[in-house]
Image (cartoon, rainbow, N blue to C red):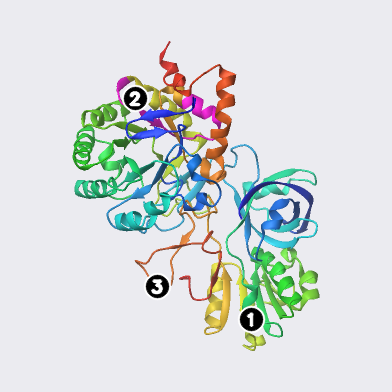
Amino acid sequence: MNRLSIELPGLSLKNPIMPASGCFGFGREYGQLYDLSLLGAIMIKSTTLEMRLGNPTPRVAETASGMLNAIGLQNPGLKGVLEGELPWLEQFDVPIIANVAGTETADYVEVAKMISRAPNVKALELNISCPNVKCGGITFGTDPEIAKELTRAVKEVSSVPVYVKLSPNVTNIVEIAQAVEAGGADGITMINTLIGMRLDQKTGRPVIANGTGGLSGPAVKPVAIRMVYEVSKAVNIPIIGMGGVTEVADIIDFMSAGASAVAVGTANFVNPFICPQIIEQLPAKLDELGIGHISELIGRSHRL
Amino acid sequence: MIIQDRMTVTSQQQIAHNIFEMKLNGKLVGEISSPGQFVHIRVSDSFEPLLRRPISIASIDQEVGEMTIIYRAEGRGTTILSQKRAGDEVDVLGPLGNGFPVEETAQGETAILIGGGIGVPPLYELSKQLTAKGVKCTHVLGFQSKDVVFYEEEFSKLGETHIVTVDGSLGTAGFVTTVMAELGNEFSTYYSCGPMPMLEAIEKMYAGKKGFLSFEQRMGCGIGACFACVCQTTEGAGKAYIKVCSDGPVFPAGVVAI
């Protein structure tokens, strides 16, 4: 028996570890370093209808135990991803979760419809929480009614289950989670980055050309854990948790908080081998905790 | 191949004001394929600072499996790095990027190598490899002032070397272009690494000549996945960016929009 396997809508995961969208490109760079079939799944970089060049540089700035980024959804566009990226990923035995972004509902619908038909795309992740683009993205993720309607529209056209990626930049994340569940979401992924800013000491101006950026890394983990805990208690759909994961102990925390699987983001930039390393360390960690199957961890924190 | 290696510091010394020369031993050295490649160093095993620091490789010794890096201790990360001592271990990812093409200059031909400040180090291994194959190298090395000049003697052993300082405290006063104007255009290839304004001036001055420039940009992952270190090409706005870390850092002259 594989004690790391997890079954989620659309996804038969050999283990619950996957790189987070935006931190792994389309896998090519990491594919040179290790066998991508080791991963539970891969969340590919956001795909928009048309190619996007992204924001001007500087696009990243380091912060205390974290980093800010404002890449701006640079990607080759739907056609480029369908023709150039997804077919390459087919050589690996790994389900792909395609992150879908847009500036209006029609964009999301078109991208979702087409990309969900690719043979290795087993689920969609709706990006309604990107803080770094001028229109779209986060505007869909901060109003429960708009989030629900977008989820519904995408569900209608998608050939695979739809997960919605939530923004932490809201007053009440539970309300948004319940709205997307009502809209028909099959699952939730959370959290995206927290909006932040770093200033240059000499000039006093923002370091990142975009002004603000999304904060990620170990600094955001407590916020993410709290939100996964709250949302998992309030919805009946599974959660893929993320936010500041850097080591195997963080996987235990996210699953205990209520996540059914965990994504690794910024840590891929620090240690490109982090995902396979965590996967390798998981069985020993479960032994240490006296856990037989990893699913026993899910929502442990709720049993008070 | 890119590997993650816990390399051992074999020596560390300050060779100019805030400029450190560090030697590291490990199997990563065997993977280095061209001068101008860089390594991505994690200066601490904690999350402070979180990201790695990209540092160019100044020279390699394949026989003993040792490489030398030269860097300026300026920010938090490089200051921590400068406190490492012989015997310490450092987490190094590399070798990264595409270096200078040594094969672009044939035996008997002349190359001019122009470096600015902390852009000088990768030119040292380049010059070693070029001179070893019989290329005549001329070096023009620019620094802010005398107290930050390094490797004058090392470069002089390999070929004609001109030191330029902005304040005139050593060598020619002014910028590298002052010396370049005197040297003329009688060479086959030029190679350069340094600040953007310097690269821009060089490209203008040597318009039409065969040249290779190494660029610097704020980096995240160093392997091409995060899209932080992009720059525009001369094809103009609206064209896809290129990545300094994995497409570069060395590009043929005329490719990157400066």
What is the C-alpha distance between the residues marked 3 and 2? Answer: 48 Å
Q: On the rendered structure, is B133 left or right of A99?
A: right
Which amino acid is tagged 1? Thr
Residue A65 appears in view: no
- Give neighbour class at mark 3: few <14, some 14-19, many 20+ (Cα, 10 Å): few
What residue type is disc 3 on? Glu
Q: Which residue is mark 3?
A: B235
Q: Position of residue B140 (x, y in %)?
A: 68, 76
Badge 1 local density, few (<14 within 10 Å), some, or many (20+)? Answer: few
Secondary structure of the residue carrying tag 3 is loop
**Is residue B247 shown left or right of residue A183?**
right
Nearest the eye: A174 or A300: A300
Q: Chain of mark 2?
A: A
Q: Is residue A252 magenta?
A: yes
A175 in relation to B13, above or below = above
Q: Which residue is mark 2?
A: A231
> Looking at the rendering, in which quadrant would you find the N terminus of chain B?
bottom right
The x and y percentages for residue A160 are: 28, 39
Side of B56 where A19 appears, left or right: left
